[in-house]
Image (cartoon, helix red, strand yellow):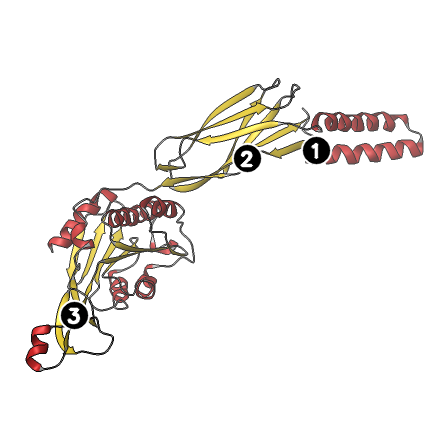
């Protein structure tokens, strides 16, 4: 019942009681009129609608700026003609309304709609509901026919084929100081201990010294890329900087997955899914700025705690954090981790500086990312 409906009902009852008690015809007539309007509204609202509603999106994954279209098909599954109704469907924060004409038995009505994709987001489309009511808007009856569908508007990507390989694979095969009994980097020989793999026995040395000797190896480091994104509102001068940072993180992550490299992406509430590029991009679609978001002054600690075995760390921030604060974060990372701090500053000139295993780059657009990575590799 709408607000107007409640007013009509209460006013009609009050006028009817007063008119009946005092015997005033002047109050009884408008009371009957108002209550009669409510009865007519009730008659138009009650009754069962037997629809078959199908909500179909052309695809539930699109990139920013791509066309996203959908279709609603409503069919009358009853043996009688159904009265006209209104179809409403929430689309993100807005809503779409369609007029459904009177449908005969087995008749269908189709509506095509477009979903705005100008901004990265997870757009919830639906549920589709039918609305029946009276022309005066006193009563409304809503019936839900479908479940909501998520439409993922992915961030724009830039191709890093070849440009990122030097950064993402830089430490592949580098030996560490961790000793193991099975790897590729030979370290030394030691006495055989019960339980050692006999395949690692060095027979020539064993014959010379008169006892079994086995090979011992050093663990080799395999590339594990950790990407950490600041989501603190205070780290960005505007929303466009944040969108650039998200697109940068997504581009690097997708390239690492295509190269079949181990990947950890830290953003928002926690690690994003990295089992496939589409799922990573789905999670990137839902990243949002927050007043209490994790800022650039926490990224180094976060990587050290969540990806302790990372060989490459890429920290993404806006134009607000200072170089000194970002260098301080690098101290929290394990020794030997190659670190790249990417500062996203809308419209800024491209700058790259290197300090040992630390590189700090400032870029003004997503298109600068391949050049940044090439400079980091060349340096």
Please identify, in this view, whether the residue under mark 1 or under mark 3 is nearer the observer.
3
Above or below, 332 relative to 317: below
Of callouts 1 and 2, which one flags the residue occurring earlier in the amino acid sequence? 1
Q: Which is nearer the eye, 211 or 130?
A: 211
Please identify, in this view, whether the residue under mark 1 or under mark 2 is nearer the observer.
2
Q: Position of residue 292 (x, y in %)?
A: 43, 58
* Few, some or many residues within 10 Å of mark 1 (<14, 14–19, 20+): few
Residue 371 in sight: yes
Q: Element under label 3?
A: helix
Of callouts 3 and 2, which one flags the residue occurring earlier in the amino acid sequence? 2
Q: Element under label 2?
A: loop
In this figure, which residue is indicated by the disc labeled 1? 4
Above or below, 254 relative to 69: below
Side of 97 where 224 appears, left or right: left
Q: What is the quadrant of residue 316 in the picture?
A: bottom left
Image quadrant holding the C terminus, namely bottom left
In this figure, which residue is indicated by the disc labeled 3? 200
Q: Element under label 1?
A: helix
Q: Are marks 3 and 2 in contact (CB under 8 Å)?
A: no
């Amino acid at each position: 019942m709408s607000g107007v409906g409640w007013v009509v009902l209460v006013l009609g009852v009050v006028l009817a009681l007063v008119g009946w008690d005092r015997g005033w015809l002047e109050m009884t007539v408008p009371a009957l009129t108002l209550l009669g309007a409510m009865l007519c509204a009730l008659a138009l609202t009650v009754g069962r609608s037997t629809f078959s509603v199908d909500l179909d999106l052309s695809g539930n994954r699109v990139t920013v700026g791509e066309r996203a279209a959908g279709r609603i098909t409503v069919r009358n599954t009853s043996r009688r003609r159904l009265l006209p109704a209104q179809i409403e469907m929430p689309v993100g924060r807005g809503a779409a309304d369609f007029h459904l004409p009177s449908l005969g038995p087995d008749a269908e009505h189709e509506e095509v709609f477009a979903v705005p994709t100008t901004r990265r987001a997870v757009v919830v489309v639906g549920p589709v509901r039918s609305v029946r009511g009276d022309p005066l808007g006193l009563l409304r009856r809503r019936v839900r026919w479908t479940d909501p569908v998520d439409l993922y508007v992915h961030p724009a990507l830039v191709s890093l084929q070849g440009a990122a390989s030097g950064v993402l694979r830089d430490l592949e095969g580098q030996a560490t100081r961790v000793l193991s009994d099975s790897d590729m980097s030979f370290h030394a020989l030691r006495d055989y201990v019960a339980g050692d793999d006999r395949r690692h026995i060095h027979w020539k040395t064993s014959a010379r010294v008169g006892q079994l000797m086995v090979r011992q190896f050093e663990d080799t480091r395999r590339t594990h890329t950790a990407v950490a994104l600041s989501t603190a509102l205070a780290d960005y001068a505007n929303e466009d900087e944040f969108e650039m940072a998200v697109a940068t993180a997504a581009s690097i992550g997708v390239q690492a997955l295509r190269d079949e490299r181990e990947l950890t992406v830290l953003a928002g509430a926690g690690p994003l899914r990295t089992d496939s590029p589409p799922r990573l991009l789905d999670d990137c679609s839902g990243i949002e700025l927050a007043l209490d978001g994790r800022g650039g002054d926490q990224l180094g600690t976060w990587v050290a705690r969540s990806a302790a075995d990372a060989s490459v760390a890429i920290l993404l921030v806006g134009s607000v954090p200072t170089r000194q604060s970002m260098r301080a974060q690098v101290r929290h990372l394990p020794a030997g981790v190659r670190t790249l701090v990417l500062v996203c500053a809308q419209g800024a000139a491209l700058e790259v500086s290197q300090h040992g295993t630390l590189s700090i780059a400032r870029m003004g657009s997503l298109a600068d990312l391949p050049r940044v990575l090439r400079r980091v590799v060349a340096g």
